[in-house]
Image (cartoon, grey):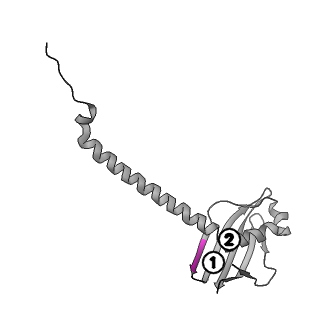
Amino acid sequence: MSEQHQKSWFSRNWLWFIPVTGCLGIILLFVFGIGAAIFGVSKMITNSTPIEYAMKKATENEYVIENLGNDIEKYGIPSGNISLKNNDGEVDFSIPIRGEKGEGTLVVRGIKTDGVWTYEDLYVRIKETQEEINLLQNEKLPEAI
């Protein structure tokens, strides 16, 4: 009787295994890289000074608390844009917010000049009633960075 020596699985299949796993690895790295970049940019935007200032004003406003409740938080995907160049910039953002009583949208529009933000619009639009609660009290407030 002769003994047959059978090749291992890898030595029989290496011609297709290496290219497929290499391509799959590159695709996965690309997908995870894009996901990490999107997450990083969105985290950077939502933690910017105008957004933090607007959230602070909204959570401290008694009419917003009356309509949305306590523990107001951001949720969903914010929309708009923010552009910064040295000490100047612009922000035009809408952020979905909610509390235990309801939901709304926080709108922030402003200009940054020489490191100081001036807010043109800062209000909460209540989803159920479409009422707009002005957080600036009809004045433009500069916020130093």
Q: Main secondary structure of the magenta part?
A: strand
Query: What secondary structure is marked by label 2?
Result: helix
- Residue at x 59%, y 75% (from the top left corner): 82
Residue 51, label in figure: 2
Check if mark 2's residue and mark 1's residue have beta carbons within 8 Å: yes
**58 to 20, vertically: above or below:** below
Front-lying residue, 54 or 75? 54
Query: What secondary structure is marked by label 1?
Result: strand
Count neighbours of disc 1 (C-alpha within 10 A) and say few if under 14, some if 14 to 19, many if 20 or more.
many
Q: Quadrant of residue 100?
A: bottom right
The amino acid pointed to by label 1 is: Val
- Residue at x 13%, y 16% (from the top left corner): 2
For disc 1, the marked residue is 91
- Residue at x 63%, y 76% (from the top left corner): 92
Farthest bottom residue?
Answer: 114
Q: Which residues are magenta?
A: 80-84
Front-lying residue, 41 or 70? 41
